[in-house]
Image (tube, grey):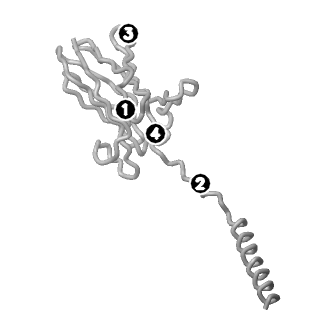
Amino acid sequence: MKKMLSNAVVYCSLIFAAFGFLQSCKETTKAPVPDNKEEQITTVKLEFYDTANGQILNYYFRDFDINGTNPPSQWDTIRLAANSTYTANLRLLNESDPNSIINVTGEILSEEKSHIICYSTTTMAVIIRTDTDGQFPVGIATKWFTGLTSTGNLKLTLKHQDGIKDGKCEPGTIDIEVSFPCIIK
């Protein structure tokens, strides 16, 4: 009986050892998660060029706190002259790491068939997107025609329209949307 008990203990020990060995051979590394997150944008920069006098104006929206718990660190009011024409370029940046600023504009342009920048304003200005993806407007480059003195807002929206882009602002998902105060005088 003692010998049978001893053999059973050895047998059980071997089973547990084998089980432990097989468990240790099991792959513990997790499969990589695909890096398909949306563009991270902390800074929107509008660069205006006055076609009449060559003046360059830059306006920024900066929000380094991506999760939105703190207010933006910079939110400029766009100030343009009445009855004027401007060309403008949009720059989208990720400045969350000041030692490694990423120009997201290039990424948007490399995926221009899936992106559109939409502009709407409550001021006396007409905004025309002047760049295209070969078929539909993109909106990185624009031309602005200001009218009479007015005050309002400019809403700028970067839409992601993968596979559904048709030149209109709907449908799609919003990558970033900013409403700038705007004064024309």
Residue 32's tag is 2
Say which of marks 3 and 1 sits in front: 1
Q: CA distance from mark 3 to mark 2?
A: 49 Å
Q: Residues within 10 Å of mark 4 (few under 14, many from 20)?
A: some
Label 4 sits on residue = 39
Q: Is residue 46 visible?
A: no
x 80%, y 88%: residue: 2
Residue 125 position, x and y percent, is 22, 23
> Which label's residue is closer to the chain start, 3 or 1?
3
> Which label's residue is closer to the chain start, 3 or 2?
2
Badge 1 amino acid: Thr
> Which label's residue is closer to the chain start, 1 or 2?
2
Q: CA distance from mark 4 to mark 2?
A: 19 Å
Say which of marks 3 and 2 sits in front: 2
Label 3 sits on residue = 55
Q: CA distance from mark 3 to mark 1?
A: 36 Å
Marks 4,3: beta carbons within 8 A: no
Badge 4 amino acid: Glu
Badge 2 amino acid: Pro
Marks 1,4: beta carbons within 8 A: no
